[in-house]
Amino acid sequence: MKTAEAKKREALLEAKEENLKTRNELEKEVKERRAELTHYEKRVLQKEENLDKKQESLERKEESIQARENNLAKKSQEVEDLYRQGIAELEKISGLTSEQAKEFLLQTIEDDVRHDKARLIKELDTEAREEANKKAREYVVTAIQRYAADNVAESTVSVVQLPNDDMKGRIIGREGRNIRTIEQMTGVELIIDDTPEAVVLSGFDPVRREIARVALEKLIVDGRIHPARIEETVEKARKEVEAVIKEAGESAALEVGVHGLHPEIIKLLGRMKFRTSYGQNALKHSMEVAQITGLLAAEVGVDIRLAKRAGLLHDIGKSIDHEVEGSHVQLGADICRKYKENAIVINAVESHHGDVEPESLIACLVNAADAISAARPGARRETLEAYTNRLKQLEEITNSFDGVDKSFAVQAGREVRIMVIPEKINDDDMVILAHDVAKRIEDEMQYPGQIKVNVIRESRVQDVAK
């Protein structure tokens, strides 16, 4: 029993000690928390005081800003009043209103700008000509001198001579059966009129027309003209013309030194033997462009073989442009793509009439060579109507500009001389007028070579001695 009571007492003492210890710890923690809260409370109070001070400061600044705004508004009104007074004084002194003064100032600035523009155009034009003309003239003249070309002599034959007028009846045949057979077999119309000892062949396809010509000449020589014989002769003529086409294409490629062309391209080149443009044979023109492009390429230091290839193929689309819809430029580019030609050659074909931008120097050389071949004396024949219409259009364009008195197209349309009214056009305006006229001619007209624009301003003073 004693032991149990002693243990009980010890347990109670231990419990009391533990309770006391826990109580002391709690009191200590509470004291620390109170101290911490007191510290936070002091900080919050201090921040409130600072905020109050800042608010007071902001209110003072706001009052100051408001005062400044009021002062600025007052001064702005004063400045506005002074500006109006100044404008009124200036108008009174100058005798001009503000709108009149503004117009006068703008006119003065415009005159200065026009003068500077004219001077700049003249300087740039002179500089460009000095830099470019020397080399360009040297290259072009060298190429032309080194290439000897014939004047236009060949054109597609469309008239077949007959030994006598009796042959016309035999060609027509009984009830027209012979002439109908020839037209059906060749796709060419035969025109038999009062022209003595001649038959006119009419057809848009030059190759068909050539087949018809060869077949008709064979029939005339043979003398046996009937539908069966006509069919046989036309077939023979077609084979002969195809052989001539192939030979012409191979000969052209060999002559200009272009090798490795696809057989179909060779045939298309040969077909151009029977195609003309303004009287200029398309195949001869392509060969000429190839030679000139090669000469120019040698001068500027680019690939001569590739340049000749691009020059030879630049008009290849003309061989089928009467059969397939589209321009010869696009058709030519499509042909070159089809037969895996070089990308430079394709771009030269596409850009030689300015439809797309040239991407290589060779394309620019082909463009120049094409212009040289087409524009050189004797290269092409033009009808009188087309020639006179071009001169008339040239003078109409120049006469449409304000200040132009009269104009004259001279040098076969290669030069236009413009007489201006001196009271309306000054020296600076002349430069701008020449530039504007040249630009409009480029935009509205098609012509070989270049057209020189000369603006002439002449002032005359006359008096009489008595």
Image (cartoon, rainbow, N blue to C red):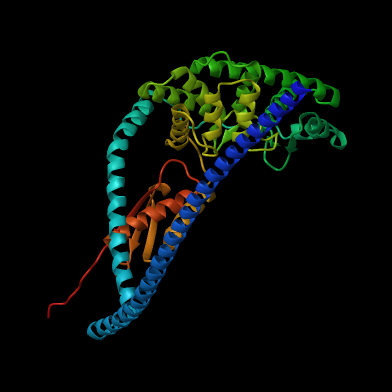
What is the quadrant of residue 115 in the picture?
bottom left
Q: In this image, 222 relative to 135: left or right?
A: right
Residue 236 seen by the camera: yes
Residue 158 visible in rendering: no
Residue 119 against residue 254 in the figure, above or below: below
Q: Residue at x 32, y 36 (%)?
A: 132
Residue 111 place in picture, x, y as percent = 30, 65
Residue furthest bottom as drawn: 92
Q: Is residue 282 left or right of residue 451?
A: right
Q: How many labels does the image show?
A: 0
288 sits left or right of 111 in the view: right
Residue 212: x and y, percent? 72, 28
Location of residue 9 (image quadrant): top right
Q: Residue furthest left?
A: 466
Residue 368 image position (x, y, % from top left): 44, 33
Q: Which residue occupies the foreground of this view, 449 or 33?
A: 33
Question: In the image, residue 57 lies at what x, y percent?
Answer: 38, 66
Depth check: give the residue in front, 196 or 30: 30
Quarter of the figure with the C terminus: bottom left
- Of the 4 image quadrants, the one containing the N terminus is top right
Residue 347 versus residue 450 in the image, above or below: above
